[in-house]
Amino acid sequence: MQRICVLGSTGSIGTNCLEVIRAQPGRMSLDAVVARRSWQALGKQTQEFAPRWAVLSDEGQRNVVAADAFSTRTEVLFGADAIERVAASPEIDTVVSAIVGAAGLRGTWAAIEAGKRVCIANKETLVVAGPLVMELAQRSGATVLPVDSEHSAVFQALQSGRRADVKRIVLTASGGPFRGWKAERLRGVTPAMACHHPTWNMGQKITVDSATLMNKALEVIEAKWLFGLDVSQIEVVVHPQSIVHSFVEFVDGSVIAQLSPPDMKLPIQYALTYPERVDGLSPRMDWRSQFQLDFEPPDPENFPALRLGYEVAARGGTCGAVLNAANEVAVERFLSDSEAFDFCDIPTACRAVLEHHNFDPSPSLDELVRLDGWAREEMRTWR
């Protein structure tokens, strides 16, 4: 029985993960759930699964939560330290890192340091501290597996050949709701428009990132560290149907792709059961129906966030932490007041903050955390 801790259990990835666990009662048990402040939803999860621990990272919830909302078999904890303690517990085998943003780094770090199987849906962990995280995993013996659909697709396709024979990988992007739009039209984008994704059902922040292509920029950075690639080996193609989740091209010209209907339960389950494959809940391809798959190059002129991803991946060091933090606050500003901070300001402001920071090619984790805070303050006052 695999004992699982889900960091971010009340979010989109977290609730999908719980569906996978629910469908595999003989293989998996949910032993810890973590959320920021959604105590009602967290309580309902404990009533169903009766995990050993439930953690709310927001200390301010300590005097707010109703004790009877949680299972009597669940210990309720509060604060970031509790997340790290639970993630590293010897009573946990696997940690699913699904907290959105840099907030997920500490818990993921603790799990990797403890040598766990860590299923990363929180791409920011590798964007912020990719080389440090992968070096730590090598030292501790932790297994780091991707949950992002694109990186899961690459990981699955890589099973077809040797790493030394990889020519390049190609990450697919849906293009978001504004595919084909020009900058003048993008100036009028509202938060409601940006939060309406054509093929995926995700949280607001990730959906806005998809619309700006910043999500793909962060995935380029993540792929570099996760798979040990040179930036020149990573390409992006727009694929609006979101059926082909990514490709791997080998030196002999063979291209291996992973296809499936857009549904996060498949990559979540693969990360939890790897190297096995088991029957699950994910929808299947209908090969009896006629359909087409379209591919086109991305548009970096009107969606400049993608260029930032390549630049940051190439430079490394402190750039990933600064870009990620700046983008998180930029998206918050756009969602809260799009008239004062519009959609096109997001990549522009991120570049400004990135270019203004004191670059360090080999930062410590503490330095990355410090710069995360600095970049957030810079973005809050940017104009």
Image (cartoon, rainbow, N blue to C red):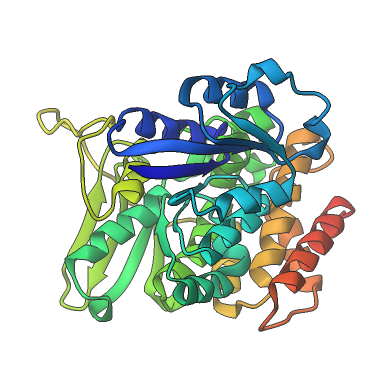
Q: Is residue 254 left or right of residue 219?
A: left
The structure residue drawn at horizontal position 74% and vertical position 68%, both measured from the top left corner, is 354
Residue 226: x and y in percent read 44, 67
Above or below 273: residue 136? below
* Viewer-closest of 75 and 372: 75
If the image is split into quadrants, where does the C terminus sit? Answer: bottom right
Which residue extends farthest top?
68
- Which quarter shows the N terminus? top left
Q: Nearer the viewer, residue 113 or 150?
A: 113
Please state the total of marks drawn on the protein image: 0
In the rendered image of this protein, does residue 245 appear above or below residue 370? Answer: above
Toward the viewer: 81 or 188?
A: 81
Say left or right for 53 vs 14.
Answer: right
Residue sitting farthest toward the left: 288
Where does residue 131 sit, x and y in percent of width and height? 55, 75
Residue 342 visible here: no
Q: Residue drawn at (9%, 29%), measured in percent from left and top?
A: 288
**What residue do we see at 64% from left, 42% from top?**
186
User: Which of these two is toward me, 226 or 323?
Assistant: 226
**Figure check: 148 above or below 131:** above
Relative to 132, 37 lies left or right: right
Q: Position of residue 274 (x, y in %)?
A: 28, 53
Residue 359: horizontal and vertical position, in percent?
74, 79
Left or right? Give the position of 317 relative to 131.
right
Q: Is residue 134 visible?
A: yes
